[in-house]
Amino acid sequence: MLRLASASLAGTAIEFYDFFVYGTAAALVLGPLFFPSFSPLAGTLAAFGTFGVGFLARPLGSAVFGHIGDRYGRRPVLLGSLLLTGLATVAIGFVPTYASIGTAAPVLLLLLRFLQGLGLGGEWGGAVLLTAEHAPEGRRGLWSSFPQIGPAVGFLLANGLVLALSASLTDAQFTSWGWRVPFWAAGLLALAGLWLRRSVEETPQFRALAETGRRAEAPLAEVVRGHWRLLLLTGGALAVGYAVFYAVTTWSLAYATEHLGVGRTTMLACIMAAVALKGLVTPLMAVLGDRYGRRPLCLAGCAICVVWMFPLVALLRTADPLLMTLGFTGALLGMVTMFSVVGAYLPELYAPRIRCTGAAVGYNLGGVLGGALTPIVATALADGSGPPWGVALYLSGIALVSLGCFALLPETNPLVVRKRADAVRATETGAAEAAAPV
């Protein structure tokens, strides 16, 4: 399990590195380089628009790779998605700017970002099923949390490299060529990930499906036709996690550097500290999910996000590194309380024959609802000299919607479900014995 979980974590870390390095570049340099005729605000919005395209591609990628995973196995998904995302990311590092090729520059950027999202849309489903379908029942949440640590590791890799470049290069050097280096580095990481995953075994549950001939012929159609309500609920439930994460890691970076005069290096360090703590806490929360259930942690995480968004904005406005880090940490702890268990929760909601498609599409639908629009909406709401309370209200509103969606989802932890069933049977037996005539 440790070997499988490590391979799963490494792959998600590499793929999310690819995805996050674009978000950081969009916040810092892509606006003036690829949309120079726009105003600074419009350029940032346009750069975040290309950022959002990656999220729109993710459900499509989850449908395509989910079909492969449900029809041909989880292992091909792990290799194909990593290769696609890695190639698209390296190619972004070679795209000429608007000054060199005109409007073809943002068009190429848009296309490659779409391919990035397509690959990442398939990655998550394959990675969590690799651990969830191998893991023992009582530790499924713990082992399935390893892919959920991957985004934190990928973010730290991406922003650590950007931070090192930002600190060692002049602004002119960073704008000229320094921002491209993290994209080129994605090629080496992709090769490392493919090497780690080369010997990964197919999951026992898929092998059983293949042997009995019970694989779904059209997984997406089956999911949409028979589980559309579940799909919408999971997408809505996960929206807050995406919204909070990208508000902290992408929007706040742009807002603080442009509106508050905070240095790029300082902001990256503050955000990275909060993300590192998030990664460390993830397996601890997952253990609680194995003991007390997935749903209670998801509800608690949403509640934290509801109440913390206004303190987040207030602490960000201070421009004090320690206070900003405190604000970011509180927000990400709320987010990870729920996201630590979704690697086990979503697969448990779907039957094995459609699990890769259902879990991945639901997860990435949450990305569209919460991640694609948040940097754009937050940037627009924060335009002005006063505190961006509209951003806090927007994020709290999403958290309330997600809270309602989680409230409508069932508990899936097998141990908790059995305990509740046993308690109900014991109560019914006791009531029947009490009512029986003497």
Image (cartoon, rainbow, N blue to C red):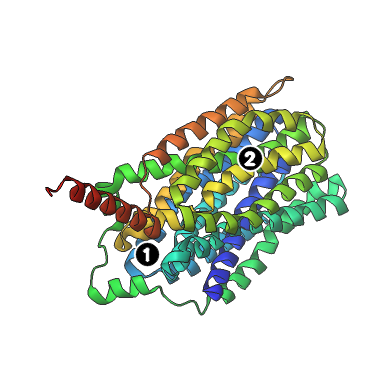
Position of residue 105 relative to residue 5, above or below, is: above
370 or 33: nearer the viewer: 370
* Residue at the outermost left position: 437
173 or 263: nearer the viewer: 263
Position of residue 180 relative to residue 29, above or below, is: below
Q: Residues within 10 Å of mark 2 (few under 14, many from 20)?
A: many
Identify residue for label 2: 331
Residue 83 position, x and y percent, is: 54, 66
- Residue that appears at 24% across and 50% down: 430
Position of residue 318 relative to residue 235, above or below, is: above
Residue 64 position, x and y percent, is: 39, 57
- Residue 68 got which mark? 1
Q: Amino acid at mark 2?
A: Ala
Q: What secondary structure is found at the residue carrying circle 2?
A: helix
Q: Amino acid at mark 1?
A: Ile
Instruction: Give the side of residue 310 with respect to residue 59, left or right.
Output: right
Q: What secondary structure is found at the residue carrying circle 1?
A: helix
Residue 263 position, x and y percent, is: 83, 39
Residue 371 in view of the camera: no
| Quarter of image, res 146 | bottom right
Q: Earlier in the sequence, mark 2 or mark 1?
A: 1
Instruction: Give the side of residue 436 with respect to residue 291, left or right.
Output: left
